Amino acid sequence: MNTSNRRFLSAASLLLLVAVAVGYAPPVRAAGSENCPATLQHTFARLQDEKPQSLCQYSGKVVLVVNTASFCGFTGQYKGLEELYARYKDKGLVVLGFPSNDFAQEKGSNQEIAAFCENTFGVKFPMFAKSSVKGPEASPLFQQLAQLSGTAPRWNFHKYLLGRDGKLVDNYSSLTAPDNKGLVRAIEQLLTQPVPR
């Protein structure tokens, strides 16, 4: 081993000892996160049991992110969202629901919300624990989507559409129903695109 190699190893060993002494640990990336787009590099508690779920599991899918509420004039959109999910899930669409009380229309517990969604609308698409979707308290995902689109949710059932590559394609107001022709056409077009390698 030549002198320059010994010096490099000594420096590397010293850095490792210092790192251990100060308690530094390199960040651990979630399994598969190297191929996970930035928009999906978030973890949320699942609505039903509050177990943490990485959104990276939806990499390569067309993703429709929706902030939801149980007591809103748009709550009936749950039915349309579930129909959209059922119709296209085998082709690669996933609908992700994020209940929020930011508009004072989701006051129940996570268990109450889960029961309401399943019993009233038969919701099977993934739902996550109640969180904030606007302003400084918004979850990192919704802050990111607001920054990318220039639009934070102004009400419940705002929709963000992501392509298979995780990039934001468009966003839709609460007034855009899940069966809106433009939204459905955009989803169908994105589903024809190949899954990124």
Image (cartoon, rainbow, N blue to C red):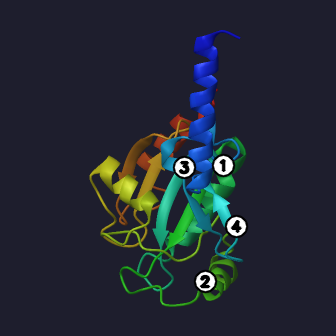
Q: Is residue 26 visible?
A: no
Q: Which x, y percent locates residue 66?
A: 48, 63
Quadrant where the image shows the C terminus: top right
- In the figure, 21 relative to 37: above or below? below
The amino acid marked with disc number 4 is: Lys
Which is nearer the eye, 111 or 95? 111
Please tell me whether mark 3 sits on a helix, a strand or a loop: helix
Q: Secondary structure at mark 1?
A: loop
Judge whether 5 appears above or below 79 on screen: above
Amino acid type at image mark 2: Asn
The residue pinned by badge 1 equals: 30
Screen quadrant of the N terminus: top right
**Residue 140 vs residue 58: left or right?**
left
Q: Do callouts 4 and 3 mark residues in contact (Cβ within 8 Å)?
A: no
Question: Between disc 2 and disc 3, whose residue precedes?
Answer: 3
Report the residue marked by disc 3.
40
Residue at image coords 30%, 69%: 154
Q: Which residue is mark 4?
A: 124
Q: Relative to residue 141, is residue 42 drawn left or right?
A: right
Kindly report which numbered mark, 1 or 4, lies closer to the viewer in this rendering: 1
Instruction: Give me the C-alpha separation between circle 4 and circle 3.
Output: 20 Å
Which type of secondary structure does the marked residue at label 2 adopt?
A: helix
Q: Residues within 10 Å of mark 2 (few under 14, many from 20)?
A: many
Q: Residues within 10 Å of mark 1 (few under 14, many from 20)?
A: few
Q: Which residue is mark 2?
A: 110
Q: CA distance from mark 3 to mark 1?
A: 12 Å
